[in-house]
Image (cartoon, rainbow, N blue to C red):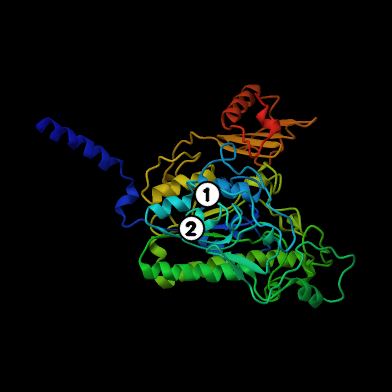
Amino acid sequence: MKLLHFSVIPMLLLVFLAVPAFADMGPPPNIIYILADDLGYRELGSYGQEKIKTPRLDALAAEGMRFTQHYSGAPVCASSRCVLMTGLHCGHSLVRNNWENGGWGEFQPEGQYPLPTGTRTMASLLKEAGYTTGVFGKWGLGGPGTTGAPEVQGFDHSCTVICQRKAHNFYPNHLWKNGEKFILDGNGWFKAHQKLKEPLATEQEYYDRYLRDKYMADVFLEEALGFLDNAHASNQPFFLYYPSPIPHVALQVPVEDLDAYPREWDPEPYLGGSYLPHPRPRAAYAAMITHLDREVGALLDRLEKLGLAENTIVMFSSDNGTTWAGGVDYEFFDSTGELSGLKGSVLEGGLRVPFLVRWPGKVAAGSESDFPSYFPDVFPTVLELAGLADDRPHDGHSLLPIFHGGSFDRTKPLYWEHGDQQALRLGDWKLVRRRLGKKNPATKLFNLKEDPGEKKDLASTEPEKLQELLEVSRQSRFPSKIFPNPGLDNDR
């Protein structure tokens, strides 16, 4: 028995030494993750934007860490959000593209492909760990009454535009709150995609047609602030997921927000087509991002008021890069800077996104990291923050060493696939394959350290590196019966 007794001592010592450095810094932190929708890499002042005003997000960057090489989970909405929630990249995740449960009519079924029952989401794991969990914003991982609805996937409280199609109108006639339809009085229903043959006579006619009483982003903010109040009152750690629908088109924003931007920006109106018309499209896009900036400020202010800021980590990012649709003038705003590609593309402009992290006393103010990171890393990071064992399958690395000013060698590549495209980043090297399964497929190799704009294809001059990345890409995925991809599934 004495041998057994003494043999436990070194084991206990090893356990003690293995405890993360942050574990003795008090209770597990509250966690807020804010997700913009289609916000480009250069659309915040802290990332070089010169036209759009984002003072609160710029202050967030100054108070914490700014990542310069962070990537979304996919170049479109649903698959990117699935990656974020599950920590599995698009070669392993369930949802690998946008999928629709219905059409655009008022009474069409709502929702995208649902996460199945038993999915180990970030929210469900945090809930098991004693966190109260809330989601307020755009969901996109299962419609009402399905296995993918937020209340089934680990969220105690929810108020969402549960269907991505419904999110194309910022004045919908209803949202979904804790599994029940939540009618927005004064909004009614109108078609979210309209095209004018010619400009309307006055600006007011646009607003009368395409604006209503309740801007859904404001409803989400009100619900999120109430969640913070209740979490504080219950003295329970919380996880707040805030996937704002901004700045995804349609171009809709309260009229008073337009006053922050010059009329001279917009000599011509946007007449609509794939989305709703607007008389001042550039001003509207900028005003939407500034509106989101104020939402972030309101959340941060509430943390301060409640005395929660010191023990709350706040993360901010975007689900993919800037769109080309709906009247967005990405060239006017220099939305992607030197990066190539836009939303829907696995080039840098479709995937590289802002990532800001503030954690007072734990993340150095004004710090910056060029560590290559992406959405699958958020999952193990959150697990470690909550003191949970890192024993769930995922494709990421915990970023806590980076948050604390350290470093580590990344052993897992960054991987994406979307439709007929595939990309993989390994160190400074990036493989980009496009038009897979078509008559004119293209395979390119870039060194992002020397060529972040992906202008110089090195596939012919670096054949060994090309073959290395091709082999890693083959090993990084398995076929999906739900989202079959012949161009990749037959790549052996």
Residue nearest the observer in this picture, 261 or 113: 113
Query: Dot 1, crowdedness within 10 Å: few (<14), some or many (≥20)?
Result: many
- Quarter where residue 434 is shown: top right
| SS for dot 2 | loop
Upstream in sequence: badge 2 or badge 1: 1
Residue name at image x 73 percent, y 32 percent: 436
| SS for dot 1 | helix
Q: Which residue is mark 2?
A: 155
Residue 403 visible at all: no
- Quarter where residue 97 is shown: top right
Q: Which residue is mark 1?
A: 85
Q: How many numbered discs sit on the rendered protein? A: 2
Furthest toward the left, the residue is: 2
- State which quarter of the image contains the N terminus: top left
Q: Position of residue 235 (x, y in %)?
A: 35, 66
Q: Position of residue 315 (x, y in %)?
A: 50, 56
The answer to whether 357 is drawn above or below residue 446 in the figure is below
Residue nearest the observer in this picture, 33 or 450: 33
Residue 253 visible at all: yes
Q: Position of residue 273 (x, y in %)?
A: 82, 59
Nearer the observer, disc 2 or disc 1? 2
The CA span between labels 2 and 1 is: 12 Å
Q: Position of residue 289 (x, y in %)?
A: 64, 64
**Amino acid type at image mark 2:** Phe
Residue nearest the observer in this picture, 340 or 414: 414
- State which quarter of the image contains the C terminus: top right
